[in-house]
Image (cartoon, coloured by chain):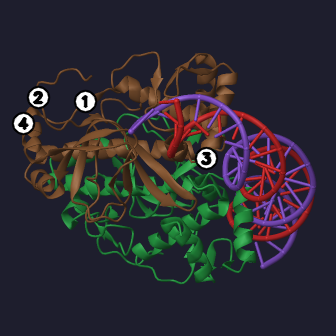
Chain colours: A green, B brown, C red, D purple
Amino acid sequence: MLAAKRMAGPEIYAVHPWVLGNLGKGARHQLLSDDERARLSKIASIVRFKKGEEIYRDGDEADAAFNIISGVVATHRKEGDGDNVASFLYPGDLFGLSEEGCYVNTARAATPVVAYKMPLLAVRRMLDSNADLDVDVIIKLCEELREAQRHAMLLAQKKAITRLVMFLDLQEHLKTSRGESAPELYLPMDRSNIAAYLGLTPAALSRAFRTMITDGIIAFRDRRHLRILDRDAFNRLADNLSENG
Amino acid sequence: MLAAKRMAGPEIYAVHPWVLGNLGKGARHQLLSDDERARLSKIASIVRFKKGEEIYRDGDEADAAFNIISGVVATHRKEGDGDNVASFLYPGDLFGLSEEGCYVNTARAATPVVAYKMPLLAVRRMLDSNADLDVDVIIKLCEELREAQRHAMLLAQKKAITRLVMFLDLQEHLKTSRGESAPELYLPMDRSNIAAYLGLTPAALSRAFRTMITDGIIAFRDRRHLRILDRDAFNRLADNLSENG
DNA sequence: CGCTAACTTGAACGCCATCAATGCTTGTGG
DNA sequence: CCACAAGCATTGATGGCGTTCAAGTTAGCG
């Protein structure tokens, strides 16, 4: 059901770190040239995963990197009380590359997923012989770094609602950075996945949603589509965060 | 009290990401060649900061990068309920580089600090004209990324003691990666800084310490030096985390 | 030696985890 | 297309833990 794509092959999107300072109006750009995509597609194969299926496991030998075509992947890490979600990955994202030797976290399909699978060895050979890709890797790493730091700041919040607002805010930025302008926010992943990302139990997440619904700040059309009704109240919560009133 | 250094100039240390997979026995290596250090030292000046002093502030125009000679720097970010510590930076660390345009967090001396200050423009010129430094930047970014992800996983823990154990574990790895083998752990920063890093209040941190002391797991010589007495109990807590026993 | 800031400790409250039961969706097979 | 089953989400009740506010103590520094 994708819009027809003339050009096949991996697509890696990222915001250019030195185009904008903050996560303001950052749009994501295609990092790969047509030539690079063509060469990558020669060594890539298309793989499919059912929702909930494991793509790779913590400790497995890292032999391939993945580039998402459609769907959402969640990377997990088992810690103390169950496993937490370290990141959500969307179409255009690349994962499985940062590791050498063994994967350091577990990747699982949060929705049905279609992806390019590329043998790590071949990718690394390309990187070695192509200085241009170095810059791309740096850009991608910067993006992942910023996201990890945002995630940490989110998790440092003490109240469930605060974390949820930061999460929704982040999702909105992702949406606009993809160029979508729908008034609704789409949350493709399960509640339990969101809860794990927020460091909460599903029950606590549900209550936080309920509170915001009762206060008339947000409304759900169905379990995955929500709309922000009271933008002022929402921003008041969000501003709390980035500017500490 | 540093060992005499024949060679002056910036030093940037990092673990090589593809020497070891995990944070196992990873030792940090000097990334810069003597030549690079010599050239960097030409554009660097030495600056000093008193404990608590602000090095740069969120939103300031980013005009310089810093390389720590001695002391500890904490990067802060103001969020919802006060400001949290995003990272601690030690001698050999480089900071203020990831940004272009404006600093995205506030850096503050957690102890008295001596550092090299390098104009960003000059550093960037060097990077552009020197492909070797690209790899160094990638290595450094990988390291920061891993650390940010560990921080997030730490913050996803629900109990104060769990977070504290993960933090102490991390400090131990840092110590061994610096090649130190003292039986004591040295915590140069204030309690309030540690609490902010752990996403806790100083009160909660104090209670977590007290519990571990009462249980005979750790003991303090003074406020900054502690020793792990019951390694088994400590590891049991730590293993809890990475293996979900 | 006294001051100040940081740390610790105490008591009460509030929020989230936990456990358990109900209700809703989704996917499967008849 | 419908019925059923299994998983997921919500809701309720309770208890533990961390926050909060405040007082007392210690450490660090002039």
Residue under pointer 2: B7
Single out the mark in the foreground, 1 or 2: 2
Query: Percent from the top left, x then y, of residue B57?
Result: 35, 59
A135 relative to D8 in the view: left or right: left
Give the Cα separation between the discs numbered 3 and 1: 35 Å
Question: Going from the N terminus, do you reach mark 2 or mark 3 first?
Answer: 2
Give the residue type that dot 3 points to: Thr
Residue holding disc 4: B35
Q: Residues within 10 Å of mark 1 (few under 14, many from 20)?
A: some
Residue identifier under label 1:
B29
Q: Please tell me which residue is depicted at 62% across the width and 31% down the height of the picture.
A: B209
- CA gap, disc 3 and disc 4: 46 Å
Q: Please give the chain letter of the residue carrying mark 2.
A: B
Residue type at the position of mark 2: Met
Q: Are marks 3 and 4 on the same chain?
A: yes
> Which residue does the image show at 27% across and 36% down from the upper left?
B92
Q: Is residue A217 above or below residue B5?
A: below
Count of marks, rendered view: 4
Which residue carries the number 3 mark?
B201
Cα separation, mark 1 vs mark 4, equals 16 Å
Q: Is residue A82 visible?
A: no
